[in-house]
Image (cartoon, coloured by chain):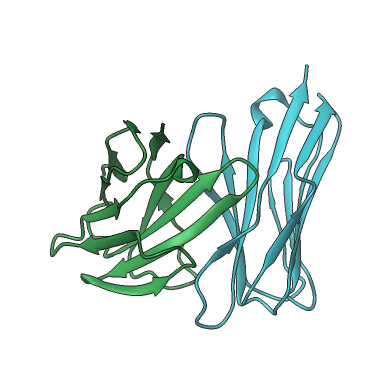
Chain colours: A green, B cyan
C-alpha cells in the first residue's frame, strides 16, 4: 500500500507570492490534516478535511486555505507569502479522522520564502 | 483551548544511558499518542494510550499514561544511536483536534 505522498518536496518562493501544496492520502483514507513544522514550535495544526469538507481549523490567518477533492486528495494554498511562512508542511491521513486513529504522515514539503 | 506541554525540548545522552520525556496537558485527555521523527524524516506513529494509569512497553521503550489522564511519559532504557530523533506526544480530548507537544529532540553520543 502506497504511503502518503506530498508534492513538491521542496519549494522556494519570494515574499508576496502564493503557493499550492498537494497531498495524496493512503488509499481508503478520507481524512487529511495539515501541519506546519518549524524549529522551536513543533507541529502546529492548520486544518483537517474529511469528505471534501473542512472539519477543523487551527489558529492560522486566512492566507492559509485548503480543499479536498472527491478522491480525498488535498491541496493547501498560502497566499501573499511572508518570510515567517518558511517551514516544513506536513500532511497526515487517517481512515475517518477520529481522535483515536493513528496519523500517517507524508514526507512533507519544505517551503523557503526569500 | 487544549495545550500540551512537553519537556525537555532537547536531551543529549551518552549511549547506554536512559532517557525520559514528559508531556502534560491542561485538560483531561481521551487518549495520548507518541510519534518519532528521525532527522530529515517525518513523524511515525509509535503507540497510543487510552486507559488511566496505562503502561505499555515496546522493547526498550516504556510508555505511561497518568492516573488523571493529563500527563504521559516515554522512557527509553539503555539508549542506542538508532534512538536519535524527535519524540512527540499528541493528545486529544473530547471533540477537540489532536494537539502535539513541542517535541523532545534526543541526541545520543556514541
When the figure is inspected, residue B66 is found, relative to residue B40, above or below; the finding is: below
State the quadrant of the N terminus of chain B: bottom right
Where is residue B65 shown, x and y percent of the image?
A: 74, 66
Q: Quadrant of residue A2?
A: top left
When the figure is inspected, residue A110 is found, relative to residue B48, above or below; the finding is: above
Where is residue B100 shown, x and y percent of the image?
A: 59, 59
Q: Quadrant of residue A67?
A: bottom left
> Could one spot residue A10 in this view of the protein?
no
**Residue in the image at 73% along x and 68% along y:** B54
Where is residue A18 shown, x and y percent of the image?
A: 27, 46
Q: Quadrant of residue B64?
A: bottom right
**Residue in the image at 75% along x and 44% along y:** B9
Where is residue A61 shown, x and y percent of the image?
A: 42, 63
> Could one spot residue A93 in this view of the protein?
yes
- Looking at the image, the residue that sits furthest to the bottom is B94
What count of labels does the image hold?
A: 0
State the quadrant of the C terminus of chain B: top right
**Residue in the image at 56% along x and 33% along y:** B38
**Residue in the image at 14% along x and 60% along y:** A71
Amino acid at each position: 500500500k502506497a504511503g502518503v505522498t506530498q508534492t513538491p518536496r521542496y519549494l522556494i518562493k519570494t515574499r508576496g507570492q502564493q503557493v499550492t501544496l498537494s497531498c495524496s492520502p493512503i488509499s481508503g483514507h478520507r481524512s487529511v490534516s495539515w501541519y506546519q513544522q518549524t524549529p522551536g514550535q513543533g507541529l502546529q495544526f492548520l486544518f483537517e478535511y474529511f469528505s471534501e469538507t473542512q472539519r477543523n481549523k487551527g489558529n492560522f490567518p486566512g492566507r492559509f486555505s485548503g480543499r479536498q477533492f472527491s478522491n480525498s486528495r488535498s491541496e493547501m494554498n498560502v497566499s501573499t507569502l511572508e518570510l515567517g511562512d518558511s517551514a516544513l508542511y506536513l500532511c497526515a491521513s487517517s481512515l475517518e479522522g477520529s481522535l483515536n486513529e493513528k496519523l500517517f504522515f507524508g514526507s512533507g514539503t519544505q517551503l523557503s520564502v526569500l | 483551548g487544549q495545550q500540551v506541554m512537553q519537556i525537555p525540548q532537547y536531551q543529549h545522552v551518552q549511549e547506554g544511558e536512559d532517557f525520559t520525556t514528559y508531556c502534560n496537558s491542561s485538560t483531561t485527555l481521551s487518549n495520548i499518542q507518541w510519534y518519532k521523527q528521525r532527522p530529515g524524516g517525518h513523524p511515525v506513529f509509535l503507540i497510543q494510550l487510552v486507559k488511566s494509569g496505562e503502561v505499555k512497553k515496546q522493547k526498550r521503550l516504556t510508555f505511561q499514561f497518568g492516573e488523571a489522564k493529563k500527563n504521559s511519559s516515554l522512557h527509553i532504557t539503555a539508549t542506542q544511536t538508532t534512538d536519535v530523533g524527535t519524540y512527540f506526544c499528541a493528545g486529544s480530548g473530547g471533540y477537540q483536534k489532536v494537539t502535539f507537544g513541542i517535541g523532545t529532540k534526543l541526541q545520543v553520543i556514541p
